[in-house]
Image: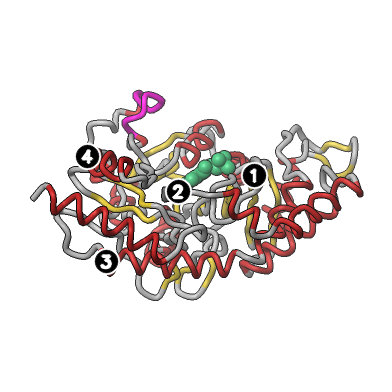
Amino acid sequence: MIKFLDLYAQYEGMRPEMDEAIAAVLRTTGFINGPAVSRFESEFAEYLGSPHCVGVANGTDSIEIILEALALPAGSEVIVPANSFVGSSEPVSRAGLRVVFADVDPHTYTLDVEDVRQRVTPRTAAIVVVHLYGQSCDMRPMLELADQHGLKVIEDCAQAHGAQYEGRHVGTLGTAASWSFYPGKNLGAYGDAGAITTSDSELARRCRMIANHGRVEKYNHLFEGRNSRLDGIQAAVLSVKLKRLPAWVETRNRLAMGYCTRLKDIGDLVLPVARARCRHAYHLYVVRTARRDELRAFLTSAGIETGVHYPIALPKLAAYAGHGQAMEEMFANRADGMLLSLPIGEHLTDADVATVAEAVKRFFTLSE
Ligand SMILES: Cc1ncc(COP(=O)(O)O)c(C=O)c1O
């Protein structure tokens, strides 16, 4: 059996340190806004090279809080990639803004800058750039475009812990960045957790206040905020895992290279392309074939777990029926039936990758 994700094996590999870190929070009862939270915020900021990190309750909230802190005019348009998790677009609408979907590039699956350019209108206020599958968007032209039109750039880094763009960590490139530490992410908590990073101290201060009831100190509230805080136990878990993140990303890259060499020129299989001079974090290794469902069933019967990210492009979700972009000629609207995520992660070995690759080859050979 080759698992898609094995969080128990990961825990086993660091059990004494993890148990002690959790027990330390229990002993000191620093459950909310305790020392474990500020420690993780500093460690993560330092790891990224970001001046500020604000822990929040989850990745979806982090986007919504950033948008609220930016105080964009109500009803402004925000451009979001058509292939992503709904957590990239949902906070836009919840913040009283209008989602406009843009297409993704068929090689890297990140936002297509030219398509974004076509969709900018006088009402556009921001772009949510999603570093999808662990790969950075092409930030240089994206930031140029944003500059030309005075747009804010929110980096959705939920899948990109460890990814870099031309030597800089993602999450340090735009106006602000959102992070999810959902358990299955490259850096995952043992429950929901998230963070915001930014180099703008005023924005960081506002985000921190919004996430903590708009207060400056206990019972002194400057405005109505909300409750979206990173809790102490999750922060302690994240600190233990952060130390291991570079090695895990290294392993993900090695395994991805294994897939890339073994899966070349097979049937109609399209392999992901890594951007030059950038560090892919390979949260997911996504291939594409017109026979996705058959291949997936074949791999399942061979004991290989796979995933689909995502089976329905965002414009085609019932939630966005009113946006009228479901029928638009976009790569993302066609690709959702063809994408297949092969297992990748530090729980796997090179031999596992060879086994998966052999099974994929067998599928295409048997049906030739
Ligand atoms: C690209 C993307 N954006 C946003 C989110 C939302 O994060 P969360 O589940 O922590 O709210 C996720 C993950 O689940 C994601 O993959």
Mark 4: which amino acid? Answer: Glu
Nearer the N terminus, badge 2 or badge 3? 2
Closer to the N terminus: mark 4 or mark 3?
A: 3
Q: Depth check: give the residue in front, 26 or 12.
A: 12
Mark 1 lies on a secondary structure that is: helix
The residue that disc 2 covers is: 3
Closer-to-camera residue (233/326): 233
Amino acid carrying label 2: it is: Lys
Left or right of 148 on screen, residue 9:
right
Q: Label 1: few (<14), some or many (≥20) within 10 Å? A: some
Judging by the rendered image, the residue that carries numbered circle 4 is 294
| Marked residue nearer the N-terminal end (2 or 4) | 2
Q: Is residue 317 located in the magenta-colored stretch of the structure?
A: yes
| Front-lying residue, 15 or 264 | 15
Q: CA distance from mark 4 to mark 1?
A: 46 Å
The span picked out in magenta is 315-322
Q: Is 357 on the left-hand or right-hand side of 92?
A: left
Tell me which numbered mark, 1 or 2, is placed earlier along the sequence.
2
In three-dimensional space, the C-alpha distance between marks 2 and 3, rounded to whole angstroms, equals 19 Å
